[in-house]
Image (spheres, rainbow, N blue to C red):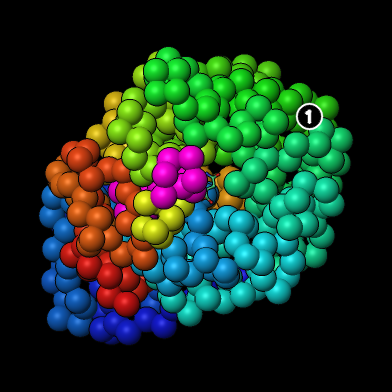
Amino acid sequence: MSERVESVQPRGGTVLRGGTVIDVAGERRVDVRLVDGRIAETGDLPADGDAEVIDVTGLVVAPGFVDLHTHLREPGMTEAETIETGSRAAALGGYTAVVAMPNTDPTQDCVSVVEFVRSQGRSAGLCDVHPSGSITVGRAGEQLTPFAELASVGVHLFTDDGSGVQDDGLMRRALEYAGELGLVLAQHCEVSSMTTGAVMHEGECCSHLGLPGWPALAEELMVHRDIELVRLTGAPVHLLHLSTARSVALVRAAKADGLPVTAEATPHHISLTDERLGSFDPLFKVNPPLRTMADVEAVRDGLVDGTIDAIATDHAPHPPQAKERPLDAAPPGMLGLETAFGVARAHLDLELRELIGLMSWRPAAIAGLADRHGRPVEAGEPANLAVLDPDGRWTVDPGRLASRSTNTPFTDVPLVGRTRHTFLHGVAVVRDGVATR
Ligand code: DOR
């Protein structure tokens, strides 16, 4: 199923002149011409009266980012976000595709809800919205959803995100079923019996503050179980928002054993620690929680050495009235789409090409979108592109974010790297840092 946005372009298309292309093939200084939703040609393109020329000197032209983990909240929680506002936030962050998490109301567990999300995304026309399906009906952890039927309408990634599948036997069956159909299951790793009432990471900080803790082990036990289920079934699993040093080590060992395990980490787990909860500010409450500096460093190392395959935002909007509740009553979650590149660039010691890979072609492959997103910047390819200012320094003003919510934890964090333009199917949906629709 391919989303299309009508393109209104001069006859000669749009030429991105003077930039550096960075894609899976490497880095080169070429101009890029976009015509009718595709890249028509690259090279040293002479002036041409029929084309619109955008000067991208000093900027990087890259395949658009792909977010494996976006909460768009629609249907059901439109006071927090809508598919349109979340898609606009995604486009401003340089994303051309997002995977929409299923914890909507109603849940994305049947064809009608999935089709609704997809069609709202198509009408917004700001990024490709690919709904995930839940693994279990209503995310209740009891009965599997109709994977084959959902796959027939284009769902590739299944997850109960917001919670993990607790029942070992059910998870085994889900893996067998998904593996046969060529689908991917994505797990929110949390043994819920160990985290009841928890508001932050269980550790020194939490004891000082006297708050109920979320032990690292609650994540690691499920990471371990799922790796063993992958060993048994041969079916792939994707592990969502890894947050602990031991989880990273378990995934590293699983990959060394040749198991089809992939993993992601969020911008907040590579930049913030549990000490931020010392302010009792619910902006820093998230699930899994912010961990210790040793965990942050291990997650960064996992991204740098290839153990962790992708940076995913876990963009989780919540309206101010919810985040203004006391810490124990406030919902977990943070905004991420508009700040991900700037946070990741500021906190990871990585070549720009490696970082773009973690946000573009590597998540595109996990999401089953590698035919449309994260593609090489070459003639004939779909023009889904981000034009990045890799060294632009900026700070976030929550009031100016496109998201309907303002729950960013990054207001006082200096960011490096910003999206200047985003092209979706050849159309500039972001121009000079401003959404065009
Ligand atoms: O912090 C989180 N918020 N983690 C999740 O897994 C779910 C998300 C949400 O939906 O708000």
**Considering the image in quadrants, where does the N terminus appear?**
bottom right
Q: Residue at x 49, y 66 (%)?
A: 128
Q: Position of residue 407 (x, y in %)?
A: 35, 52
Specify the quadrant of the image occupied by residue 409. Answer: top left
Depicted 203 relative to depicted 128: above or below: above
Task: Answer left or right for 436 relative to 160.
Answer: left
Is 103 included in the stretch rendered in magenta?
no
Find out whether residue 330 is within the magenta segment.
yes
Q: Is residue 169 left or right of residue 246?
A: right
Residue placed under numbered mark 1 in the picture: 229
Quarter that holds the C terminus: bottom left
The image shows residue 257 at horizontal and vertical percentages of: 68, 18
Tell me which residue sits at (44%, 76%) in the image: 124
**Residue at disc 1, secondary structure:** helix
Comparing 41 with 181, the one in front is 181
Residue 200: x and y in percent read 47, 30
Above or below, comparing residue 116 to residue 353 in the picture:
below
Majority secondary structure in the magenta region: loop
Q: What amino acid is found at the position of numbered circle 1 in the picture?
A: Leu
Residue 79, quarter of the rendered image? bottom left
Give the magenta-colored segment's residue range: 325-339
Given residues 324 and 428, the one toward you in this image is 324
Percent position of residue 217, x then y:
61, 20
In this view, 341 is above or below 433: above
